Amino acid sequence: MTVKTEILDRLFDTIAARKNADPSSSYTAKLYAKGTAKIAQKVGEEGVELALAAVQKNRDEVISESADLFYHMFVLWADAGIDPSEIYAKLAEREGLSGLDEKASRDKG
């Protein structure tokens, strides 16, 4: 773990710890209480907001919306029982592969 990823690991740990918290005391717990569909909706919304900020070339909004997307994506992972290490392993597996080759290998499966 590097200094740059420590904040992400701490964020994920905090999010995972709030899975069973009182929804009235935590936005994260409130998302969990609303269920997977609501969590997935929030990920989609944040992705769209990030894309729009990029098209508008609004650097500050790209940064802000990226942070929001990370947060909501981590809530989704924790809800699905996925640990970030699983995502990191998938990225490591793909490292060095041509993006076109990797996509073609998924399309065949």
Image (cartoon, rainbow, N blue to C red):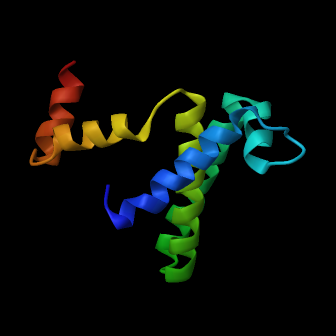
Return the x and y of residue 39 as percentages of the image width and height.
Answer: 66, 38
Residue 89: which quarter of the image? top left
**Residue placed at 72% from the left, 46% from the top?**
28
Q: Residue at x 52, y 54 (%)?
A: 10
Asked whether the viewer can see residue 103, the reply is yes
Q: Is residue 67 left or right of residue 34?
A: left
Q: Residue furthest top?
A: 109
Residue 56 coordinates in the image, percent (x, y) = 52, 77
Name above or below for residue 39 compared with residue 51.
above
Q: Which quadrant is home to the N terminus?
A: bottom left
Q: Quadrant of residue 29?
A: top right
Query: Residue 72 location, x and y as percent?
Result: 60, 49
Residue 12 placement (x, y as % from top left): 54, 47
Q: Is residue 44 visible?
A: no
**Along the viewing direction, whichever of 108 and 67 lies nearer the viewer:** 67
Looking at the image, residue 31 sits to the left or right of residue 107; the answer is right
Residue 108 vs residue 43, the one in the foreground: 43
